[in-house]
Amino acid sequence: MRIHGGDKNIDNNFRNEPYFGNQHKTEDDSGYKKKKSQENIILSINTYFDNILASRIEETMPIVLALNNFGTRKTKGYGSFFPSDMGISEFETYLKKNSKSDIYYWETDERFTLNNIKIFNDLLKSGINLKHKGDSIYTKPLIYYYFKDQGIVWEKKKIKNDLLSRAHSDTLDSDDKRFIRAILGLSSISSWFYKPYEDDLGFGDPELVVNSMEFDRIPSSLTFKIFKNGNRNRVYLFFAEVYLSILDKEFEFHFQSKNDKDKHSKPVSVFSPQTFDCNTFLDYVYKNMATHKIDFVTVSREFTSPKAIMRSIENIMRGYKKL
């Protein structure tokens, strides 16, 4: 199999879209790279005169490309491809016929597509907490509210109760505390913005570590696909069945010092949810987006500012539909 670069290079130096080769660099540094995309990429597969195999590949390839992205951050819209001789209606036909979940979509300016996906993914999974020049935007993720309605409290409550006694925590509590964000994927190490660590943990500059006997990492079950639709992009959202393998599994959390791994807290054990219906969750998200049932405090002018994030969310709200 060979992949031939396209005949048209497009410079995409859009803000807030990560290129990992630029970590710790600024645009003025040597070696700073602008992202590029290409059109008319050619994929060649040599079947060595096996006509049956060639026919099967031709039948299967549109399905594979409709359901999957490729490369780094592939579930967040990066690496979306589809045969150039097929249009958006054919893409949607393949997607609806082969997706294991319901599908939702919205349209956006192509300059802001990947950043809008990041914001929407944060809105579903991690929440948004941003301060800028004295103003702020804050909300817990929709998956928190989804499980809250079922009497289930997320893992942060358990971690705070057991390890961070001085940390602010909401009043909602339940005997059923679950690692709910595992459903949508999570890094094995994350940072918590909380100041009095040394009083609670005995060391500063900590990071939260998630361990499992069964999983090295927790990939996201959500997939965002991008399809160019005229002068705009259409973004599709659907579930893969990755989450089925992590239901009712035990995970262990502990804090450790970023600078000295021997300094760490005691472990806290939390199980993931016993059950999860992806279509019910997607419907919950749709109803909340469509009725604007999201509470925010907001601000400022820069693209990374809370006010700009609000504009992005409002644009998604206006066009968010079920396929």
Image (cartoon, rainbow, N blue to C red):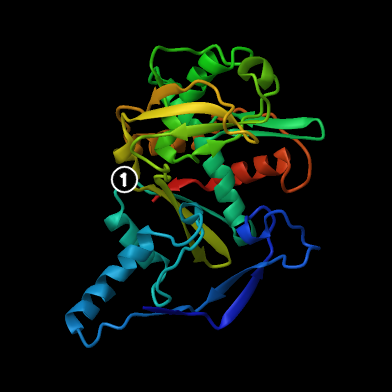
**Is there any visible trace of residue 123 in the rendered image?**
no
Point 63% across, 46% down: residue: 312
Residue 231 left/right relative to 242: right
Q: Which residue lies furthest to the bottom in this view?
A: 49
Residue that mark 1 sits on: 241
Q: Is 125 or 166 nearer to us in this picture? A: 166
Q: In this view, does 70 lie above or below 148?
A: below
Q: Picture coordinates of residue 25 (x, y %)?
A: 74, 57
Q: Is 188 or 158 nearer to us in this picture? A: 188
What's under tag 1, amino acid-wise? Glu
Q: Picture coordinates of residue 21 (x, y %)?
A: 64, 61
Q: In which quarter of the image is residue 123?
A: top right
Q: How many labels does the image show?
A: 1
Q: Is residue 209 above or below residue 22?
A: above
Residue 85 left/right relative to 317: left
Q: Picture coordinates of residue 196 (x, y %)?
A: 69, 19
Q: Is 203 or 25 nearer to us in this picture? A: 203
Point 47% across, 61% down: residue: 71
Classify mark 1: residues with Cα within 10 Å, few (<14), some (14-19) or many (20+): few
